[in-house]
Image (tube, rainbow, N blue to C red):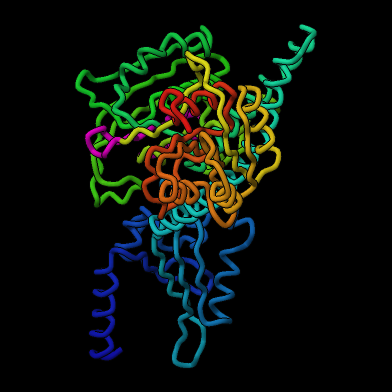
Amino acid sequence: MDESDIKTEQRYRLLIEAITDYAICMLDRDGFVTSWNPGAERLKGYKEDEIVSRHFSTFYTEEDRTAGLPALALQAAEHEGRFEREGWRLRKDGTRFWANVIIDPIRNAEGELIGFAKITRDISDKRAAQEAIFQAQKMEAVGQLTGGLAHDFNNLLMAILGSLEIAKKRAVRPDVADLIENAIQGAQRGATLTQRLLAFSRRQELQLVPVDVGGLVGGMTELMRRTIGPEVVITTHFPPDLPRACTDANQLESALLNLVVNARDAMPGGGEVIVAAERKSVQASEGTMLLPGEYVCLSVRDQGEGMDAETLVNATTPFFTTKGVGKGTGLGLPMVHGLMAQSGGHLVLKSAPGEGTTAELWLPVAHEIDVAPAAFVPEMHVDAPLTSMTVLVVDDDPLVLMNTVLLLEDLGMQTIQASSAQEALAILASGDLPGVVVTDHAMPKMTGAQLCQEINVRYPALPIVLATGYAELPDGVGDLGDVVRLSKPFSQAQLSRALAEACKGGQCF
């Protein structure tokens, strides 16, 4: 070897040793390591004297070694000129990382294979980011699907609950009334399921207000203890200066109770559940799912069996459950996930087999965002009976239309029916105005919200009730004025209350 070749080799070695972001090693023809750069030591944990002369299959998982992947990699590099693939690789301490591996053949001047050059790069962060994007896209698609299903199911429940309510009123025999009441309770459970579906798809009605999280948990601690039984101890930790969080108090209570019940189920032999909260800041540089700002992090930690990686990934997917048949709907965590997203927060699950599970509810500090409570009609009866009036009912679903008419006529109202917004406008233009309009929102061609806007322009004094199962109307819908929102499915009492609200105490046309 002449002096020029020696200098070239020295420059090459200096270059290889200066690279620390990539693991670069040389292999002989059989795959045994012959050289090792500092980047390889940093990435894989082996010092040069620990790994030289060992086979490069040391870095592969047991599954890949059993499948013969190391030998296939060398064969592909030799015959195809290059081998490149991504996969799990092992460090000296046994931990895994997701790697991009390139193997190139090295040949002498005569073209004879004398070894291989292998470059390994840790791309775990890139893979995690790709998986996060994929998971977000999957959840968005499932959310759209479940939101549509929940809307259609709400319409079915409207017809069932309304008819049962009137049937119970008209039942003569007490035993028949009891059977109807059982059917009503079953349908109301169905309504609870649709609310969880709407929560996951971020379309439920929310009242976002400043909430004292510590006070809320303290107020429901006894309820949680009665719910989970004496085998599990609940411990709470809340700092005295914890700021208020912006959320829906009722929905947060439901979410917290769900998480505590999950924690109990993960500890069949009993144990401790720790409910705690602290103030945390999120910076723009952190690259999380949360916007920069101040948050209250409410956590529920158990000492249970924990979840493996696959279960953890699927935990917030609707209808996925590890509980036995009849013991879980698979909608609890999706509901919590949807509540957090709709509140401007995020659900974070941390778990590993044998290490328990921690569920973190990240909620914006109340002063960080504008709090605008959503209008809704509570379950209550009107103190004074409504004056009989004519009500124009608009709905494209014949079952829901008939059900709403039935409830109104049982209240003593006269009704006019329209199966579309266009038909409703034609009725209004053709004769005397009704006392109030009750319209569905999700209708083809012209939505209920668009109908409300048109009525406000043509008949500004005409009261309107807009019935919808969605919390938010689509983008582009402007101010609806004094329109009263009525959540679906609604009872006769809720409908009566909505009419009174729309008519401002009964003063209708």
Q: Residue at x 24, y 79 (%)?
A: 10
Find out whether residue 369 is within the magenta segment. yes
- Front-lying residue, 142 or 113: 142
Residue 348, relative to residue 54: is it above or below? above
Instruction: Locate residue 32, reporting x and y percent.
Output: 48, 66
Q: Residue furthest left?
A: 241
> Number of marks in the image?
0
Instruction: Locate residue 90, reporting x and y percent.
Output: 46, 53
Residue 374, relative to residue 397: is it above or below? above
- Front-lying residue, 20 or 462: 462
Quarter of the image containing the N terminus? bottom left
Instruction: Locate residue 398, reporting x and y percent.
Output: 70, 42
158 left or right of 205 in image: right
179 left or right of 257 in image: right
- Front-lying residue, 339 or 374: 374
Q: Is residue 113 visible?
A: yes
Q: Residue at x 35, y 13 (%)?
A: 218
Q: Which residues are magenta?
A: 345-371
Q: Residue at x 68, y 22 (%)?
A: 186
